[in-house]
């Protein structure tokens, strides 16, 4: 394969980044060789750069197919702020504007053109494209959100199926198909429906390590919990609801609670939806409550909280929607509220489908979502397993891994279950297998004479619920498989046979539950946080003056680098990741002036401008407020009352700050004798999870007390 030694220089010049993200360089090299490509890269992984940078390094025009007007305008705006010649053609333009842009394209002034599939394939537009090919050349077609081409994907759009004619009309123009989510079946369908020729397939991990996943039961206190999460979050929040009515009701409640929030759903006018989306993207409001109509491809990097107030319809949609959190790589939270009432609503919606096969597939997808919500294993194991990616668990970034439940050895029961699947010739689903094991007398069992199997009735000692828990665990751990055609037929794999041969053990989680909150793993100081907030204010002021989203000017990650390193010369400023030559010229002086002013006011020096520190997750503003009040001598209960939080929330702030190396005097919080007892247990058991320590100590000791002492103990053994 050819190498391109100047790719890094081109990356820094145009986009301000020093290094490529995983997989980007190989994809770009393939694009520069004029290969067809299929790129599956999770949200925030940098898909757009994979076609944008090659477009700038080749002759001709790159045509980008984008499904939404807001999405294409957003990306073009960001490119133009980097000094890159890009434009879009869509229904928001009048005839005069369209003609001017078309003329600019034909004159070779543009490198990237964003267009919707409907316009691209129209009888009027294709002749214009022929003229572009003749005069300046077409360098490639980039099909963004390519999963829309497949009826097996979560956002199928029939108009995408017409794109295959591009291959026939322009056989020598390479095609790059890009998506954040695609099962194996969807990947094969994309290749077929777009006519990709021997494409290089680039499949990166679906694991978003910066996201914390949790599921909460939606009780009568759910709104209070939601309100607390929003108030604790520093960045923007997206809340998804199932119906328009729920969106309007929740928006009204939040507005009544003085939260800056707007609604988004199909019942609003086009103008209202567009205005509300723009105000959210530009940080005029922090929260948007929406149906699933909102968000596909929205390139807002600083969403810190995504809440599903209702169950999503399938895991692929949930992965896509929750993935709108933390696109910039910063720590963010994804919370799903689980209610049995939502199941009834979705089941009613499924029943309205006229196609029986569609109903079966939709019911299977709903079952997978319910299993995800009810699982006790690592949530990443379930999510990534859906896309065919094996993950061993213990992610440390989900509610189940943060507070691991006790497990039991169910190897013998697993052998019974898998043996029953084998003896019934792998032709049936979970319910029928459980019926056989429990010795049920159903018509189906009689029909297939499964009451004659040796496994018939050997599982009467376990309830249906217990067998179902085991079956779900086997599926989620990858020890058993299930068809995705709507029939949910169980299939054995190599791991299944290892279990039946006693070569592998099976442990399942038994219920227990106390939720542990999101925590981060780094250090920071108040000066950095305060400067960061000041730079955010400057960014917002500049963005409002120019009528663009704040992140278009600089991402939060770049602002945090500024706050950490405090560069006070243009040379030092230019070394920041995210500062390209165009942005250095346009914004460098203003941000440097702000940094210098802050340093003068606080008697601070530049923090080694020639060595740019790595951005790490930092203490949040709400944590720092709690810390300041604690240092002023207020008790946990007093802080909670003043801040309208629960005492447990303030305690969690202090615990997280302790783990981020802030000095917290825990003698005020925990009696010294208790600390000594916990310390002795830690010396005995070592750096293990909280559960075995709690079991050892008993009910007189809380998880919060153990975590605080453990943080202090860890710092001691490191030193």
Image (cartoon, rainbow, N blue to C red):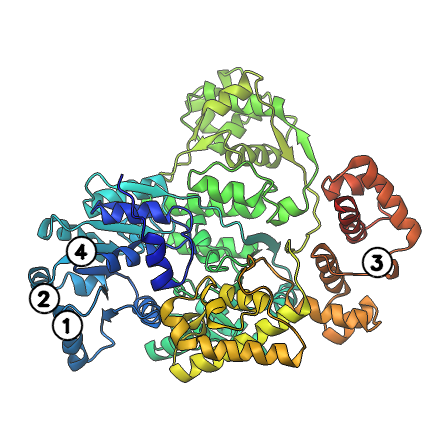
Q: Is residue 647 visible?
A: yes
Query: Which circle, 4 or 3, is nearer the viewer?
Result: 4
How far is disc 4 from disc 1 in space, using C-alphas?
Answer: 17 Å
Q: Quadrant of residue 96?
A: bottom left
Q: Tell me the residue that label 1 is attached to.
A: 102
Q: Tell me the residue that label 4 is attached to.
A: 139
Near-viewer residue (641 or 139): 139
Q: Tag 1 or tag 3, which sits nearer the N-term?
A: 1
How far is disc 2 from disc 1 in space, using C-alphas?
Answer: 8 Å
Per the rendering, the mark at residue 666 is: 3
Q: Is residue 238 visible?
A: no
Q: Label 1 near label 4: C-beta < 8 Å?
A: no
Determine whether the residue tagged by mark 4 lies in a helix, strand or loop: strand
Q: Tag 2 or tag 3, which sits nearer the N-term?
A: 2
Mark 1 Cα shell of 10 Å, populated few (<14), some (14-19), many (≥20): some
Spot occupied by residue 399 in the image (x, y as percentages of width and height): 63, 49
Q: Is residue 612 above or below residue 90?
A: above
Q: Is residue 661 above or below residue 685?
A: below
Q: Label 1 near label 2: C-beta < 8 Å?
A: yes
Q: Is residue 259 above or below residue 350?
A: below
Per the rendering, the mark at residue 128 is: 2
Mark 2 Cα shell of 10 Å, populated few (<14), some (14-19), many (≥20): some
Determine whether the residue tagged by mark 2 lies in a helix, strand or loop: helix
Determine whether the residue tagged by mark 3 lies in a helix, strand or loop: helix
Q: Residue at x 42, y 47 (%)?
A: 22
């Amino acid at each position: 394969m050819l190498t391109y030694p100047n790719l890094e220089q081109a990356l820094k010049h145009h986009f301000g980044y020093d290094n490529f993200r995983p997989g980007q360089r190989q994809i770009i090299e393939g694009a520069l060789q004029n290969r067809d490509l299929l790129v599956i890269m999770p949200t925030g992984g940098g898909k757009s750069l994979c076609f944008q940078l090659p477009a700038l390094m080749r002759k001709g025009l790159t045509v980008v197919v984008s499904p939404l007007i807001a999405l294409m305008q957003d990306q073009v705006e960001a490119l133009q702020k980097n000094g890159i010649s890009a434009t879009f053609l869509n229904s928001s333009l009048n005839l005069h504007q369209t003609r001017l842009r078309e003329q600019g394209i034909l004159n070779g002034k543009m490198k990237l053109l964003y267009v919707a599939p409907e316009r691209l394939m129209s009888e009027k537009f294709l002749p214009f494209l022929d003229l572009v090919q003749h005069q300046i050349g077409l360098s490639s077609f980039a099909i963004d959100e390519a999963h829309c081409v497949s009826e097996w994907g979560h956002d199928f759009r029939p108009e995408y199926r017409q794109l295959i004619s591009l291959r026939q009309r322009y056989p020598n123009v390479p095609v790059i198909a890009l998506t954040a989510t695609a099962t194996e079946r969807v990947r094969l369908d994309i290749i077929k429906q777009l006519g990709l020729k021997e494409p290089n397939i680039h499949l990166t991990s679906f694991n978003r390590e910066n996201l914390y996943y949790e599921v909460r039961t939606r009780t009568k206190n759910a709104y209070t919990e939601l309100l607390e999460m929003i108030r604790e979050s520093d960045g923007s929040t997206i809340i998804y609801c199932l119906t328009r009515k729920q969106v309007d009701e929740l928006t009204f409640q939040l507005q009544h609670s003085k939260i800056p929030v707007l609604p988004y759903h199909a019942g609003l006018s086009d103008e209202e939806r567009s205005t509300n989306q723009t105000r959210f993207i530009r940080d005029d409001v922090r929260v948007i409550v929406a149906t699933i109509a909102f968000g596909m491809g929205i390139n807002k990097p600083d969403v810190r909280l995504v809440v599903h107030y209702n169950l999503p319809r399938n895991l692929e949609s949930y992965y896509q929607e929750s993935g709108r959190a933390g696109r910039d790589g910063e720590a963010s939270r994804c919370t799903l509220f689980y209610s049995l009432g939502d199941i009834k609503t979705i089941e009613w919606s499924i029943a309205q489908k006229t196609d029986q096969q569609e109903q079966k597939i939709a019911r299977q997808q709903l079952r997978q979502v319910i299993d995800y919500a009810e699982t006790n294993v690592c949530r990443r194991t379930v999510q990534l397993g859906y896309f065919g990616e094996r993950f061993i668990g213990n992610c440390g970034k989900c509610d189940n891994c943060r507070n691991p439940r006790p497990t039991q050895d169910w190897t013998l029961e697993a052998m019974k279950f898998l043996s029953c699947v084998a003896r019934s010739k792998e032709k049936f689903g979970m319910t029928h297998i459980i019926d056989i094991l429990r010795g049920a007398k159903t018509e189906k069992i009689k029909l297939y004479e499964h009451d004659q199997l040796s496994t018939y009735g050997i599982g009467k000692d376990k309830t249906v619920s217990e067998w179902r828990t085991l079956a779900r665990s086997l599926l989620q751990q990858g020890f058993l498989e299930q068809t995705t055609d709507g029939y949910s037929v169980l299939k054995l794999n190599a791991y299944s046979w290892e279990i039946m041969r006693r070569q592998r053990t099976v442990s399942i989680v038994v219920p227990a539950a106390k939720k542990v909150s999101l925590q981060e793993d780094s250090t920071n100081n108040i000066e950095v946080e305060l400067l960061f907030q000041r730079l955010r204010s400057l960014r917002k002021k500049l963005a409002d003056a120019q009528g663009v989203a704040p992140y278009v000017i600089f991402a939060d990650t770049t602002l945090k680098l500024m706050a950490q390193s405090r560069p006070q010369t243009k040379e030092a400023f230019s070394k920041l990741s995210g500062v390209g030559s165009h942005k250095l010229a346009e914004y460098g002086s203003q941000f440097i002036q702000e940094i210098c002013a802050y340093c003068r006011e606080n008697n601070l020096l530049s923090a080694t401008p020639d060595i740019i520190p790595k951005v790490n997750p930092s203490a949040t503003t709400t944590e720092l407020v709690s810390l300041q009040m604690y240092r002023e001598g207020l008790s946990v209960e007093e802080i909670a009352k003043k801040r309208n939080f629960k005492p447990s929330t303030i305690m969690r702030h202090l615990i997280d700050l302790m783990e981020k190396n802030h000095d917290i005097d825990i003698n005020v919080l925990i009696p010294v004798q208790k600390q000594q007892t916990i310390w002795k247990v830690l010396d005995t058991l070592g750096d293990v999870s909280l559960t075995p320590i709690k079991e050892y100590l008993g009910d007189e000791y809380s998880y919060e007390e153990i975590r605080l002492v453990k943080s202090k103990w860890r710092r001691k053994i490191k030193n």
